[in-house]
Amino acid sequence: MQKWLGLAILAAMMSFATAARANRDVIVHARDPANWAVQSGDYNGARYSALDQINKDNVGELKVAWTFATGVLRGHEGGPLVIGDTMYLVTPFPNVVMALDLSRDQKIIWKYQLKQDPSVIAVMCCDSVNRGVQYAEGKILVHTADTSLVALDAKTGMELWKVADDDPKKGATATGAPLIVKDKVIVGVSGGEFGVRGYITAYDLNSGYKLWRAYSMGPDEDILVDPEKTLVLGKPAGKDSSLKTWNGDQWKIGGGPVWGYMAYDPELNLIYYGTGNPSTWNPVQRAGPDGKPIDQKWAMTMFARDVDTGVARWAYQMTPFDQWDYDGVNEPILADLEFNGYARKTVSHFDRNGFAYTWDRATGELLVADKFDPDANWATSIVMDKNDPNYGRPVVAKKFAPFETGTDETTKGICPSSLGSKNQQPASFSRLTGLFYVPVTRMCMDYEPFKVSYAIGQPYVGATLTMFPAPAAEGATGALIAWDGAKGKTVWSTPERFAVWSGVLTTAGGIAFYGTLEGYLKAVDQRDGKELFKFKTPSGIVGNPMTYMHAGKQYVAVFSGVGGWAGIGLAAGLTNPDDGSGAVGGFAKLSDYTSLGGSLTVFALP
Amino acid sequence: MQKWLGLAILAAMMSFATAARANRDVIVHARDPANWAVQSGDYNGARYSALDQINKDNVGELKVAWTFATGVLRGHEGGPLVIGDTMYLVTPFPNVVMALDLSRDQKIIWKYQLKQDPSVIAVMCCDSVNRGVQYAEGKILVHTADTSLVALDAKTGMELWKVADDDPKKGATATGAPLIVKDKVIVGVSGGEFGVRGYITAYDLNSGYKLWRAYSMGPDEDILVDPEKTLVLGKPAGKDSSLKTWNGDQWKIGGGPVWGYMAYDPELNLIYYGTGNPSTWNPVQRAGPDGKPIDQKWAMTMFARDVDTGVARWAYQMTPFDQWDYDGVNEPILADLEFNGYARKTVSHFDRNGFAYTWDRATGELLVADKFDPDANWATSIVMDKNDPNYGRPVVAKKFAPFETGTDETTKGICPSSLGSKNQQPASFSRLTGLFYVPVTRMCMDYEPFKVSYAIGQPYVGATLTMFPAPAAEGATGALIAWDGAKGKTVWSTPERFAVWSGVLTTAGGIAFYGTLEGYLKAVDQRDGKELFKFKTPSGIVGNPMTYMHAGKQYVAVFSGVGGWAGIGLAAGLTNPDDGSGAVGGFAKLSDYTSLGGSLTVFALP
């Protein structure tokens, strides 16, 4: 007993020490704007840099400083990290991880490549992408396509530990960036098109030991929802909050994957992330026992979870009973927005469904839910009256509800398309203006559900789509918009020929950087969207621009390498990549502007 | 009779008209320095541009203007053409041909891709490269990997005609750029490692009709050598000049492929090109009936041929009885060098064997033959005494002759390696300085022949190599040198970490441009080699820099995309690309500096 107690105390102390250290390490690195220490810039997911050597007055002079081919074609989402003198990056499948020496002409310090079965590509719905490595305590963490979570020694690239998070034979894959918080590495899983039951899992940073897993749907003990304490719009979730929203056992193949960027509030000790679509895409098959719509909770949901236990603090479902593949995985961004003269701790989220949501991030109280996509027609609004029995729910337009139209019938003219008014490419919150800068897609669709049977590892989609430019967009199928999160209003919007499929970076220099599918890196004025700079990188940009300082000089870097869902026609070598039919992108004529090719383009002032 | 005569006259007139037109078209386009109308810059193969907006005083200010991923990994040899507002390029296998609109943000005007059986890659010795398209009379000509010669409409990319030049099942492939002269398209064939009997073939530019073919070895009627009129070092070649230098029927699988750049003298009506190694690489198997060395003519030979008939005007064999794989395919460069105060019509050639040759290009008289590679030890000199029975032949050092050492024995320390003191990447002749600028490799080798049997379509190599840096190079396995062609002297030499595997471009601005295997485009002063500019492109450079003028601005463009023989370890994804053993390159640690990726980087002054 004495001995056990001693060990327990020691273990607790070690755990505390490690936790404190890990937490501090990432925070300290992220606080130094010379680094780009976290994929999202910081735990807030703001993608904002305090660097201002490059600013709106001189950004027009920006030149290419150096370039680096990654050796891989197809979609280059995410971006590199910079910690001190070293840049870390990971390619799309086969997920080559590299460390470059910024002090020695970008010499490759090490390369690491996990041996993966290439057949995994066949079960990656939307190109063989990877949204980036993360760093903490001298380790680089990568979640490879086959769901292996690998910790590497950041100095040498030596494998420290490796765990298999899931099984690609079931259709489970990994594309997201891990989130490292305290002594934990948190990862999600992709596979909503294969009937994978989504979750996030926390592993011990030092050992790879599995600490907890929280599924998106199922019994309370699986989803780590406390019926008493987990809040839903201010009220306890109640028992079986998920189970009772599914017909029979369908939750077991229910989707709700997690592959977007996550955020963390160290004070509240909460992590934030969104869950994806329920499986299948055919809503008729997911109706309740009475044949009526049923929510399929907690797919399409923003979750706030305690990082130590995984238990949900609150949950909010953006799109109950999805009929459009409006995954809710898009990134949460933590900010302290002002309401009625008071700053509130908020989390904002630009959903695929075209609505921008802002919640109180401690409680999940819904503060704002307004359309950032002027085309969105599937719902007229979100009910904001707390006394309404439908409080917090969208008012669905039956005309654009495939469930109403039925299996094997086509619902026409739904906006946005399944690509979403915005997809996974992360928005940015500028501390300078207090505005969000959001990459937008303006596509609509015709949607025809069909009956599909589940078979393990096989596509479980159940819908045929035809996508086309939003009629009101007048040929511009993308835009960058500036959004007032408290007011729920678009401040300005600049059109783009194609969907803006890159993330956004804002800086203290007053600039917002983003990339286009043709391959331009652009810099615009945060105040009015005026274009200040553009440069044509080798291939279409679906990555996220980042910035860092090295040897006294500020650099802006961005992956170029068209692909992802928007470029899957090109990436997968489909014979007619411009074909709008199917869910393969449908950006007519993208192939007239760009070809595949993965590289990093790094800019600096001359 | 009357009718026949009329038709004949009409045909003759048409033929004359076409011939004149085609010839003039290329010449006119090449004369305008705003264009880069021929892969080699002009018919002389000089790779010299009269543009001087970018010059040695301002080249340090050069910036990247735009970039363009080709969509293909592996080795990007050759380079783009520019005719007016349009840029034309071809990728390595699968040989996608593209036209870009320089006036409209490099929009892709058209793409063309011939459907080829990918198994052709397995019989391409030295990466799946293509050294460029050519242009004439509104047509783009491409010689694809599977030896198809295709004429495309330059405006639309529509296929005009297509012929199968040879059969990859025999190991015959195509990697070279065609040469378009008058109404003829002239192409060679690769396959010296597969026992292909090399040749060049002339096709009619307008129809693809085969006009003549000249083999590298065999009966006089096959090799288009006139025993009376074809000159060899000033004397008639005599009957069976090739046949009598082969043991039995070995000439039928004799190699001598043609895949380097060719040149043309319109006044003399002669085309110039070199032939490659005799098959097999095991010299013991190629000995004469008496067991002694025998020349294997006309492998390893510089040919001058009449373009209308294909008949050889003269021939010179650089490396009789090859024992080192010193292919003679490197480019001929036409210049008028001064000898004893008089300009002579010369052709110069930097051979893989380390010697630089200059001939009178009308007669084939050997004017200069000196080592441009200080390491070359396989021969001490070339016999220049016209009265010596060995006139024009190398004085071979028996110590470095694998034939002397024998099958299954290793000859150590041969310099250069089979990569050559220089490989296919073309040198440049500057009209400004009258000097040649030559990309150099400084590698040596151990060479062990082994017995090999011929089987159709199978490797017919018969030697194992280990390559290593030339000891005297002190770690720099490459260099750019300036060479005085008349004096046969190196004027200056600048070392490079790796072999310079890019072509060279010189301009009236006083600059020589070249690329490095790490990926740098460099500009040096033609006078002294002083580095004036460097920029790191995405991947290692094995392509040829070119320059053009558009809308009043001079641009310099270069393919980036490591591969070719020097980068085959990386390109083919060999598990240990740095392994020097075998003939796979052996540039230790190249993978520490660069990764695969094909793109074009285009520079201009700000």
Image (tube, coloured by chain):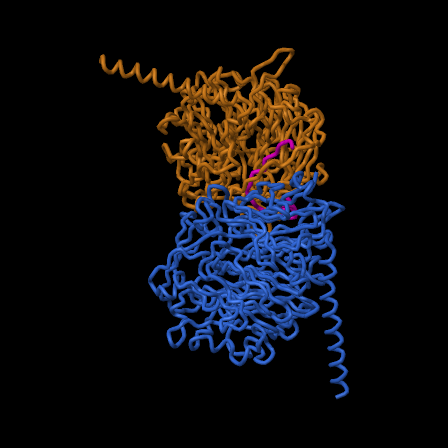
Chain colours: A orange, B blue
Q: Residue furthest top?
A: A341
Q: Which residue is at the front of the view, B306 or A376?
A: B306
Asked if A251 appears above or below B444 in the picture, the reply is: above
Q: Which residue is at the front of the view, B325 or A454?
A: B325
Instruction: Determine if the magenta segment contains residue A549.
Output: no
Q: Quadrant of the C terminus of chain B?
A: top right
Visible in this render: residue B152?
A: no
Q: Which residue is at the front of the view, A539 or B283?
A: B283
Asked if B378 appears above or below A176 in the picture, the reply is: below
Q: Position of residue B438 (x, y in %)?
A: 57, 53
Q: Which residue is at the front of the view, A70 or A568?
A: A70
Asked if B9 appears above or below B592 in the picture, the reply is: below
Instruction: Determine if the magenta segment contains residue A601.
Output: yes
Query: What residue sits 65% from the left and 63% below the top?
Result: B340
Query: What residue sits 46% from the left and 40% below the top?
Result: A96
Image side of residue B589 versus residue B105, left or right: left
The total number of labels drawn is 0
Q: Quadrant of the N terminus of chain B?
A: bottom right
User: Quadrant of the rendered structure where residue A25 is?
Assistant: top left
Region rendered in magenta: A587-606
Q: Residue furthest bottom?
A: B1
Q: Position of residue A496 (x, y in %)?
A: 68, 37
Q: Position of residue B410 (x, y in %)?
A: 35, 59
Visible in this render: residue B26?
A: yes
